[in-house]
């Protein structure tokens, strides 16, 4: 039975309506859903990138980090030299001009494009030590790099080194700028745990104060005495006396990311990360120092009051000095002003050369 003309018209209307609705849904999805979402997402990314690429500039000095402004009023400036350490001045980095007349660390950040990290130095020793501390995070992925490779990497990235490596790098950079430097360190001796039993720092002779200053670049610190109006920084000998007399005050060189602990594992795949993080405050670090600096050394010459036999078995290449000989040899003109020689003798004193250190944690 064929449909009536009225039914034919109804079926035709339904078919046409269905076709129109389907076409409408397709067009609506294409132009009002899919395309606008795609366009808006791309627009958001573009706008976000424009915001990111506006160039973040920071000045870092000791534990401070301040955003700096560009110099659009300066129409021209010399290009930023392709070096880690440059003289003060106004420089052009990329398309931006930055005032770098203060000594210290500068970071010029173009996210997802490029980073510039530059140390501005003329004669401020503290700014140079601070800047080297800022470029470094404790780790081991760069331990095999040469000093030249490290300086190149540091122009655009952090470097990840153990204590002896960063101390050696700092000594090299400061020596090239006319400073006398040397490696210093400590050995735990009979309180060893098989992991973090040795530590390396560096000393630099400050001509402005005519004395040695010890710097623990790896732990972002130099040192002063507690509760004193004398703000002088301590030598290694003074550091150790203050440490065991509970008179040691930490002065920050930087406030960077402390540890890259991913590479520190034993042969049994034991992760040492928990051990590392226990040193994350001054109190625990001072406690660790007291264990490590039972015996101390300068350039391979050890002064120890307690563990000579233990150290000699582990490091037969070391020489040993008594307390007076050690003091006269390395700190002849130094007057501590707060502790007798007996306090040094009582607690022991040792230092060591960079290439001799074999600590699992710090080498």
Image (cartoon, rainbow, N blue to C red):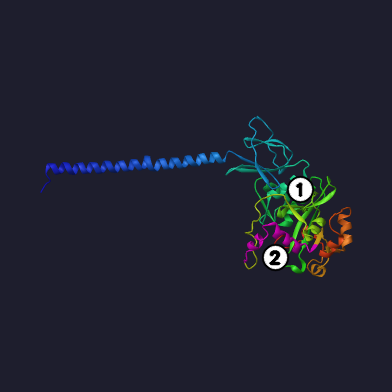
Q: Quadrant of residue 242?
A: bottom right
Q: Where residue 96 appears, x then y in whole percent?
A: 63, 35
* Residue 317 visible in the snapshot: no
Element under disc 1: helix
Magenta highlight range: 269-295
Q: Do the residues labelled 2 and 1 touch (CB within 8 Å)?
A: no
Residue 167 versus residue 319 in the image, above or below: above
| Left or right position of 56 against 349 | left
x 74%, y 45%: residue: 127
Tag nearer the camera, 2 or 1: 2
Q: Mark 1 points at which residue?
A: 173
Q: Where residue 262 appears, x then y in whole percent?
A: 62, 59
| Left or right position of 190 against 60 | right
Q: Which of 320 and 331 is in front in this view?
A: 331
Quadrant of the image containing the C terminus: bottom right
N-term-proximal mark, 2 vs 1: 1
* Residue 346 visible in the snapshot: yes
| Left or right position of 206 against 102 | right
Residue 247 versus residue 210 in the image, above or below: below
In the rendered structure, does residue 288 fall within the stretch colored magenta? yes
Q: How far apart are marks 2 and 1 (CA)?
A: 29 Å
Q: Mark 2 points at which residue?
A: 195
Q: In which quarter of the image is residue 107?
A: top right
In the rendered structure, does residue 254 fall within the stretch colored magenta? no
């Amino acid at each position: 039975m064929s449909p009536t003309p009225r039914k034919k018209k109804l079926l035709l209307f339904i078919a046409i309506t269905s076709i129109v609705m389907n076409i409408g849904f397709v067009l609506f999805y294409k132009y009002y859903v899919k395309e606008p979402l795609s366009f808006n997402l791309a627009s958001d990314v573009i706008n976000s990138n424009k915001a990111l690429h506006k160039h973040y500039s920071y000045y870092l000095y000791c534990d401070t980090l301040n955003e700096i402004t560009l110099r659009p009023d300066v129409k021209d400036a010399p290009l930023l030299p392709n070096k880690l350490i440059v003289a003060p001045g106004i420089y052009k980095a990329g398309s931006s001009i930055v005032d770098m007349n203060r000594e210290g660390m500068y970071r010029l950040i173009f996210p997802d494009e490029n980073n510039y990290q530059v140390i501005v130095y003329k004669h401020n020793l503290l700014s140079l030590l601070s800047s080297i501390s800022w470029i470094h995070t404790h780790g081991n992925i760069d331990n095999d790099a040469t000093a030249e490779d490290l300086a190149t990497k540091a122009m655009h990235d952090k470097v990840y080194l153990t204590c002896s490596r960063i101390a050696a790098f700092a000594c090299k950079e400061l020596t090239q700028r006319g400073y006398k430097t040397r490696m210093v360190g400590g050995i735990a001796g009979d309180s060893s745990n098989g992991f973090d039993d040795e530590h390396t720092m560096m000393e630099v002779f400050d001509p402005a104060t005519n004395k040695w200053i010890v710097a623990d670049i790896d732990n972002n610190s130099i040192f002063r005495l507690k509760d004193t109006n004398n703000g002088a920084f301590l030598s290694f000998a003074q550091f150790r006396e203050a440490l065991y007399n509970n008179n040691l005050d930490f002065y920050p060189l930087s406030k960077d990311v402390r540890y890259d602990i991913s590479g520190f594992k034993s042969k049994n795949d034991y992760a040492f990360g928990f051990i590392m993080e226990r040193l994350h405050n001054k109190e625990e670090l001072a406690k660790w120092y007291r264990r490590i600096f039972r015996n101390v050394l300068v350039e391979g010459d050890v002064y120890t009051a307690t563990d000579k036999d233990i150290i000699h078995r582990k490091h037969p290449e070391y020489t040993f000095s008594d307390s007076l000989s050690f003091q006269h040899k390395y700190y002849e003109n130094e007057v501590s002003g707060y502790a007798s020689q007996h306090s040094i003798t009582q607690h022991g004193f040792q230092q060591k050369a960079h290439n001799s250190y074999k600590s699992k944690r710090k080498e």
